[in-house]
Image: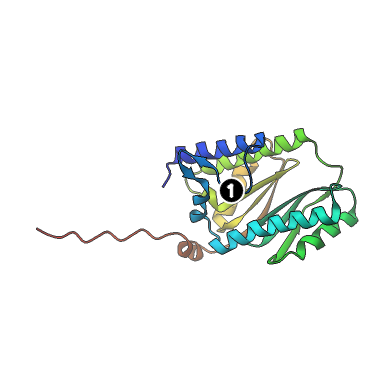
Amino acid sequence: MKSFATQKIVTLLLVSASLGGALSACAPLMIGGMVMGSLMATDRRTSGAQVEDEGIELRAASRLRENLGDRVHVNVTSYNRQVLLTGEVPSAQDKQLVEQVVGRVENVRAVVNELAVLGSSTLTQRSSDALVTGKVKAGLLDAKDLFANAFKVVTERGTTYLMGRVTQREADRATDIARRTGGVQKVVRVLEIISEDELRNILPQPAPESTKTKL
């Protein structure tokens, strides 16, 4: 497993790369010979659900371009086939249309529509939101009692959204961390709450100690 220090460095590098436009959504990131795609192993979704979520985001973005062009600014985030829509649209009709288009994408089981009827946010606002997201992720990494990779964090116009499959204790702890993060104006939870028993079944079990041969 990576050390805590390495995890935090990786998170900060990811944030810097995303701000600079150097991080591709499709290509794996290599740091010190390590493929970041290996983080899938610690995700609480099944590998199939993770692949489905990536496909949902790509198909939804493509269909939104076909149906609405560039008159809207919509971010599509899928976690365990539940889709969060954030961004801005020029009218209530467009807001409804976006939800309908995304809701028809294969494998989508639910849509949470958080689109605002406003003019598109500025590059400065989006850069600020990206920095806030990075700070929230760093705060989750700092928390010794949380699995930071169990959460997906999205920030839009100062509102931070938390997604993931977590227990009630984890949800409350992460919400508290996000609320105390500089730049966060509001926290919205789009979480799937699981029981402590379900969590124990999800987490990898430690390998049994090998029986030592007595001489």
Side (left or right) of 38 relative to 59:
left
Q: Which of the image's four quarters has the C terminus?
A: bottom left
Say whether residue 133 is visible. yes
**Residue 5 in picture, x, y percent from top left:** 45, 37
Reading the image, the residue beneath label 1 is 174
Say whether residue 79 is visible. no
Q: Which of 197 and 25 is in front in this view?
A: 25
**Residue 107 in picture, x, y percent from top left:** 68, 66
Side (left or right) of 43 relative to 64:
left
**Residue 144 in picture, x, y percent from top left:** 47, 45
Q: Which of 165 and 46 is in front in this view?
A: 46
| Residue drawn at 46 percent across, 43 percent down | 34
Q: Nearer the viewer, residue 63 or 190?
A: 63
Dividing the picture into quarters, in which one does residue 98 lie?
bottom right
| Residue drawn at 87 percent across, 42 percent down | 119
**Residue 131 in picture, x, y percent from top left:** 66, 36
213 in relation to 173, above or below: below
At label 1, the amino acid type is Ala
167 in relation to 34, above or below: below
Dividing the picture into quarters, in which one does residue 81 lie?
bottom right
Q: Which of 202 and 198 is in front in this view?
A: 202
Side (left or right) of 3 relative to 129:
left
- The number of discs equals 1
